[in-house]
């Protein structure tokens, strides 16, 4: 029976996100054989979150998958993304803090998601701190490039204090020169 369920899951994964009708059919078959399969529950949650924008329903699927197996790491990223989209900031922070303690979890990815959380909260300095932690826990070059892109985006949103000081300094110099010329 496990092989049959896996076949339906593979069919759903192969079809996602291009043929949603095929995905839903395969997932419904998989869940009818094993309603506790974390991969099927996760993909169903992704359909609800990413395609139907029904975040509450998606969160219910993700929670069900995590209740079955807290080490179902395939759930972590889509669950966190959905919580962020739904603006459940306290929940996402609590979940990331918990997930960081789970042996085998992808710490780099979790720290990156925490950086994105703080970016959404407009706490850019804290976001950069978590970007640095993500870099420390990254062990492949491809993900390092992703982290660098995220860091650049966040830094681009930070208020630039040097420009303001330079402008203020120029304005002060201009005013000083203007008053000197009047005398």
Image (tube, grey):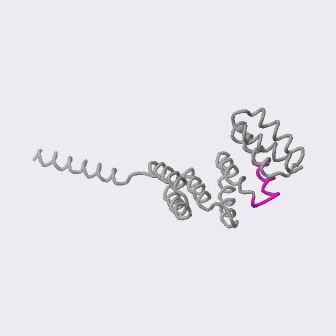
Extreme residue toward the front, this view: 3
Give residue 112's quadrant in the image.
bottom right
Magenta span: predominant SS is: helix
Q: Which of the two residues, 32 or 61, is positioned nearer the viewer here?
A: 32
Task: Check the image and report above or below for 26 versus 104.
Answer: above
Write the start and end of the magenta stretch as one range: 59-71
Give residue 115's quadrant in the image.
bottom right
Residue 101: image location, x then y, percent: 68, 67
Relative to residue 149, is residue 65 drawn left or right? right
Residue 133: image location, x then y, percent: 54, 63
Relative to residue 102, is residue 149 drawn left or right? left
Residue 43: image location, x then y, percent: 75, 45
Residue 103: image location, x then y, percent: 69, 67
Extreme residue toward the left, this view: 183
**Residue 70 inside the magenta-drawn segment:** yes
At 68% from the left and 46% from the top, the residue drawn is: 86
Q: Which of the two residues, 6 or 75, is positioned nearer the viewer here?
A: 6
Q: Which of the two residues, 117 or 38, is positioned nearer the viewer here?
A: 38
At 49% from the left and 49% from the top, the residue drawn is: 149
Relative to residue 172, is residue 81 drawn left or right? right
At 16% from the left and 48% from the top, the residue drawn is: 177
């Amino acid at each position: 029976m496990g092989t049959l369920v896996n076949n339906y899951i593979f069919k759903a994964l192969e079809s996602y996100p291009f043929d949603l009708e095929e995905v839903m059919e395969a997932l419904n078959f998989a869940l009818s054989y094993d309603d506790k399969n974390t991969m099927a529950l996760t993909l169903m949650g992704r359909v609800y979150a990413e395609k139907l924008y029904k975040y509450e329903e998606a969160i219910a699927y993700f929670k069900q998958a995590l209740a079955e197996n807290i080490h179902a790491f395939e759930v972590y990223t889509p669950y966190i993304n959905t919580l962020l989209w739904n603006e459940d900031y306290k929940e996402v922070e609590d979940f990331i803090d918990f997930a960081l303690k789970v042996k085998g979890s992808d710490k780099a990815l979790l720290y990156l998601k925490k950086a994105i959380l703080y970016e959404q909260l407009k706490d850019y300095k804290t976001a950069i701190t978590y970007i640095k932690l993500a870099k420390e826990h990254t062990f492949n070059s491809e993900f390092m490039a992703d982290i660098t892109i995220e860091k650049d985006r966040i830094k681009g949103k930070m208020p630039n204090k040097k420009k303001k000081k330079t402008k203020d300094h120029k304005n002060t110099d201009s005013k000083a020169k203007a008053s000197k010329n009047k005398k």
